[in-house]
Image: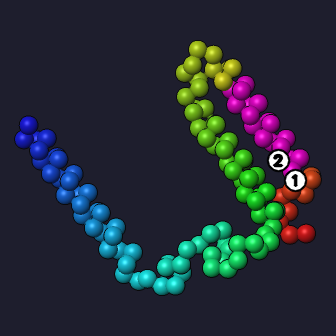
Amino acid sequence: MNLIMVMFTITSALSVILALVAFWLPLMNPDYEKLSPYECGFDPLGSARLPFSLRFFLIAILFLLFDLEIALLLPLPWGDQLSSPLLTFFWASAVLILLTLGLIYEWTQGGLEWAE
């Protein structure tokens, strides 16, 4: 019981110290960039009706799509412990092939070009 109280005390003290440092540290050097809100590179104080490039959102969606493959393939190293590891690797290969075909399609259509 004594060990549990010591661990609880150390954990609580460390949490309080880290919380105080986290609140104190950012206030040391406030400047204009840290104090202003920032939304996707647009001026937050200007008009909300300004035109923006749809290509920016296309690139962002493509990045999210191709970045999602990491989340899908993350459990793959543990797939060899399943009862049918070949089926797991088949589906992982199918996902990679589908994403590769999508990347090739976007590349040939010019969807990855930022400036024309």
> Which quarter of the figure is the N terminus placed in?
top left
- Give the quadrant of residue 46: bottom right
Q: Is residue 62 above or below residue 29?
A: above
Query: Residue 103: which disc?
Result: 2
> Which quarter of the figure is the C terminus placed in?
bottom right
Query: Residue 8: which disc?
Result: none
Percent of width and height locating residue 67: 67, 48
User: Contact, CB < 8 Å: mark 2 with mark 1?
Assistant: yes
- Residue at figure coordinates x 27%, y 67% from the top left: 20
Q: Is residue 36 left or right of residue 85?
A: left
Nearer to me, 116 or 92: 116
Q: Is residue 74 above or below residue 40?
A: above
Element type at marker 1? helix
- Give the quadrant of residue 75: top right
- Residue at figure coordinates x 81%, y 42% from the top left: 100
Q: Which residues are magenta?
A: 89-106
Percent of width and height locating residue 58: 79, 57
Q: For label 2, count other residues whose C-alpha is less than 10 Å away and answer few (under 14), some (14-19) or many (20+).
A: some
Q: Is residue 11 left or right of residue 62?
A: left
- Give the quadrant of residue 16: bottom left
